[in-house]
Amino acid sequence: MSAMPTPPAAPKMTATAFSALKGSGRPLVMITAYDHPSARLVEEAGVDAILVGDSMGMTVLGHSSTLPVTVDDIARATAAVARATTHTLIVADMPFMSYQVSYEEGMRNAGRLVAEGGAHAVKLEGASAATLLLTRGLTEAGIPVMGHVGLTPQSVNALGGYRTQAKDATAAAKLIAECDALEQAGAFAIVLECIPAELAERVTERAGVPTIGIGAGVACDGQVQVFHDLLGLGEFVPRHAKRYVDAGSIIREAVARYADDVRGRSFPGDEQSTHVSGEMIDEAFSAVHVLNRSQS
């Protein structure tokens, strides 16, 4: 009987391939992951891209914002994600103050996330003159850049909280101009976070690169969500998120059953244990007795 043929490997998703899907009619799927097991699972589920987001500050590190996350945090998490995946595009967030201090520091830190972390691209928040300059520089250096406008969590203190952005004509015009500038600077895609759905739809029609929405309506070229929000692993579910399973309850129940089994001495059972003869144990204790006498 002949062996079953090995299924062909999924084609590797690159930033170029990701960008080329603009206008294809197939929405792009992106989700966060911060470790090896979650990255393996989301790749097996068939996502197009993984964002190693600074949202880890709130989802896995216990901070109240993304601001305390460091380049070391992102690099370590990105490396774990990269070891778990073979064909998914990996985008690493540039955390707070990793690129705002100087152009040179931004180039160096982005290089670390690619060289040490194994990222295929980086994401920058905002569209200031310095961010646009860095976007051009990274693109020219061979590091693809994903832009991010609208609600930019690293600017939460300046924005006055986590709230929908670009709700009036002046702010909307500014966001449209930012998207134009990011595309001209070389960004291969742009995240639109927490902006009105109607604005996101028009921006998506105008842009020559994919828009990835989060709280920006269904008309974007793709969507990104946080792993923990989808699976019910956090206490708070943002308005823009949908909980697909209450994995938190499932995990709590499993751990409680384990605790009950340990306390009731039903775990470990024979299936989880190795057995030898009583004679062997007696022989071992006799040998120890002889050994102790010889050393005294």
Image (cartoon, rainbow, N blue to C red):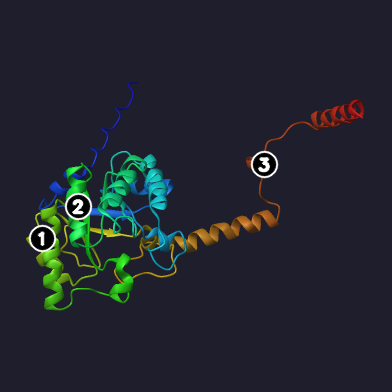
Residue toward you, 86 or 192:
192
Q: Residues within 10 Å of mark 2 (few under 14, many from 20)?
A: many
Instruction: Tell how many labels.
Output: 3
Q: Sort mark 1 into few (<14), some (14-19) or many (20+) by Cα contacts within 10 Å.
A: some
Residue drawn where x is 71% and y is 52% of the image: 265
Residue visible at 15% across and 49% down?
19
Q: In what quadrant of the picture does the N terminus appear?
A: top left
Q: Kindly state the secondary structure of the residue where label 3 is placed.
A: helix
Q: Name the residue under label 2.
A: 135
Give the Cα separation between the discs numbered 2 and 3: 59 Å
User: Quarter of the image holding residue 210?
Assistant: bottom left
- Judged from this view, the residue extending furthest toward the left is 206
Q: Which of 91 and 112 is in front in this view?
A: 112
Mark 2 against mark 3, which lies toward the viewer? 2
Determine the secondary structure under disc 2.
Answer: helix
> Label 1, on which residue?
180
- Residue at the top extreme of this rendering: 1
Q: Marks 3 and 1: which is nearer the front? A: 1
| Residue 212 visible to an observer of this rendering | no
Q: Is residue 189 above or below residue 36?
A: below
Which amino acid, mark 1? Asp
Residue topped by disc 3: 270
**In the rendered structure, which amino acid carries the disc numbered 2?**
Thr
Q: Mark 1 or mark 3, which is nearer the start of the sequence?
A: 1
Lateral position of residue 271 relative to residue 97, left or right: right
